[in-house]
Image (spheres, rainbow, N blue to C red):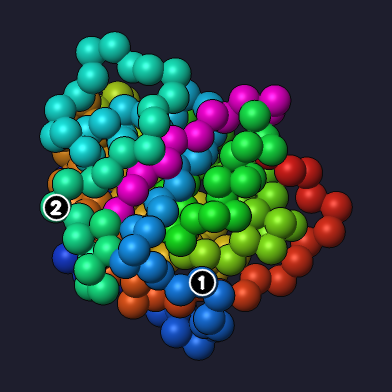
Amino acid sequence: MDEGTFKASVSDGIANTDRSSARVPEKTMSSKDGVHIVVCGAESTGKTSLITAAATESFPETVAPKLPVTRLPGSTLQDGADAFLIDTSSRQEDRAKRMEECHRAHVIVMTYAVDDLSTLRYLSRSLLPALREEGITVPIVLVGCKLDTRPDGSETSEAEIVDLMNDFREIETCLECSAKKLIQVSALPSVFRLIPCMLPVAPSTRPGQKGF
C-alpha cells in the first residue's frame, strides 16, 4: 500500500473499477435535503472516529458511542448539495434502525479494520449480503480504518479486496486511512464529490443469507 491507499486500478490514490455496464437509476440526489452518507461496518472498526476526523480534521480523545448527523465541511457536491454523515451502531439489537438509515442513504461507507482481516470478511459474509437482501443498491465506498495500528510488514490482502469488489459490484471504490494520524482522511470529500456521477447497480439477490 502507498500512503494507506489500496492500489488496484487506482486513479488519484483511490481504488476503482469500471461499473458502467451494470448501472441502473435508483435514487435522485436532492440539493434541498443533501446527500445522506451512512457509515456502517464491523464493530469497533473506527466508524465514529472516521466521521469526527473527516468533519473536524482532528482525532477525538473521547469517542462517543454514536454521533448525531454530521455535516462534512467543504463537501458541496456537483449539484450544490451538502454531504451529511450518518453514524450507525453495529449492535445486533440496533439492526432495524441501521437498515432504516441504509434505505434512506444515497451512499454507504462500509468500514473494516486494516489490522484485522476478519472484519473485512465479516463485510463479505454478513453486511454486504444483508444490503442485497433488503434491495439496497446505492453506491458503497469501502474504507479500511486504523491504518496506523497495522503491524509492521503486514498488509491488507489486495486479492481479497479485488475479489470483494468483483463479487459486490455495488462497491465503487476502496480507501485505507487512519483517523488518529489523519492519513488519507482528507481524501474522503473528493471521493464523495464523485459519487453523484455514479448510479447504483442492480445486484443479484442471495436468498438465505443472514442479516446484520
The residue nearer to you, when weighing 41 against 88, is: 88
Image quadrant assignment for residue 87: top left
Is residue 129 magenta-colored? no
Work out which quarter of the rendered image holds the C terminus and state it.
top right
Name the spot of residue 32 as percent of width and height, x first: 34, 63
The residue nearer to you, when weighing 7 against 44, is: 44
Relative height, residue 167 to residue 122 (above, below): below
Visible in this render: residue 170?
A: yes
The residue nearer to you, when weighing 203 against 119, is: 203
Name the spot of residue 62 as percent of width and height, x first: 29, 12
Q: Which mark is residue 27?
A: 1
Within 10 Å of disc 1 (Cα), the crowding (few <14, some 14-19, many 20+) is few
Is residue 90 magenta-colored? yes
The kind of residue on which mark 2 rests is Gly
Compared across the picture, whether 142 is left or right of 180 comes to: right
State the residue position of label 2: 74
Image quadrant assignment for residue 172: bottom left
The kind of residue on which mark 1 rests is Lys
State the extent of the magenta-drawn residues as a range: 83-93
Name the spot of residue 126 as percent of width and height, x first: 67, 44
How far, Cα to Cα, is label 1 from label 2?
23 Å
Residue at position x 24%, y 51% from top?
188
Within 10 Å of disc 2 (Cα), the crowding (few <14, some 14-19, many 20+) is few
Compared across the picture, whether 132 is left or right of 151 comes to: right
Relative height, residue 160 to residue 212 (above, below): below
Residue at position x 71%, y 56% from top?
134
